Image: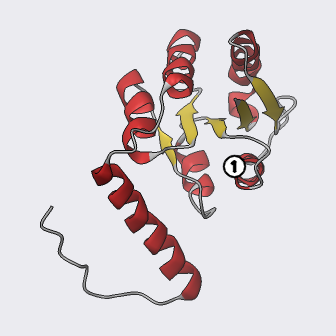
Amino acid sequence: MIVAIGCDHGGFPLKERLVREVKAAGHDMVDCGAFDETLSDYADFARRVGEAIVGAQAQRGILICGSGVGASVAANKIPGIRAAVCHDTYSARQGVEHDAMNVLCFGARVIGVELASELVRSFLHAEFSGDERHVRRLEKISAIERDTRTGVFDSQPKRDAR
């Protein structure tokens, strides 16, 4: 698998460690920066990671900022990106299995190196289940993206008995 990784200045030291770990696990990397601890903006790196995935240069992405929140918010503005902040291994795995999450975000100021490594392993080993209910939900997410691009919104959500 090819993994795009990006961070702002706050995530740089952790990113360096995770790049080594992901490569040691046999994955290829696309390093989207930052390349040092100079003050930088998480949105720039979220865009680069998201574009790498949407452009098929990578299958998944990892974003690190101080809290993980800003990177997640920015990445989710890109159609086709499903990013989430995960600070536990269950969410990192389940986010892929149920929601086809393709970008893992976390905060370098929130978690330590060992937990970050466990999150990355859980995220990269997980696979989307393909269960009908999960596919149906992803189709609804895709509809939201389409409606957002076209500016056409249905003010009344459709009721689904399932």
Which quarter of the picture shows residue 107? top right
Instruction: Spot the residue most to the left.
Output: 161
Foreground: 67 or 79?
Answer: 79
Q: Is residue 125 above or below residue 61?
A: above
Q: Residue at x 80, y 40 (%)?
A: 39
Counting every numbered tag in the picture gives 1
Q: Is residue 56 above or below residue 159?
A: above
Dot 1: few (<14), some (14–19), or many (≥20) neighbours within 10 Å?
A: many
* Percent position of residue 49, x then y: 73, 46
Which quarter of the picture shows residue 24? top right
Which quarter of the picture shows residue 116? top right
Q: Residue at x 60, y 64 (%)?
A: 79
Q: Is residue 4 above or below residue 82?
A: above
Q: Residue at x 74, y 37 (%)?
A: 6
Foreground: 42 or 38?
Answer: 42
Foreground: 88 or 161?
Answer: 161
* Percent position of residue 9, x then y: 76, 34
The answer to whether 134 appears left or right of 6 in the picture is left
* Percent position of residue 57, x then y: 80, 44
- Kind of residue at badge 1: Ala
Q: Is residue 13 above or below residue 150?
A: above
Quadrant occupied by the C terminus: bottom left
Quadrant occupied by the N terminus: top right
Q: Residue at x 35, y 26 (%)?
A: 90
Q: For the residue labelled by badge 1, is the local secondary structure a helix, a strand or a loop?
A: helix
Question: Which residue is denoted by mark 1 in the rendering?
Answer: 46
Q: How is the image coloured?
A: secondary structure
* Percent position of residue 159, x then y: 17, 75
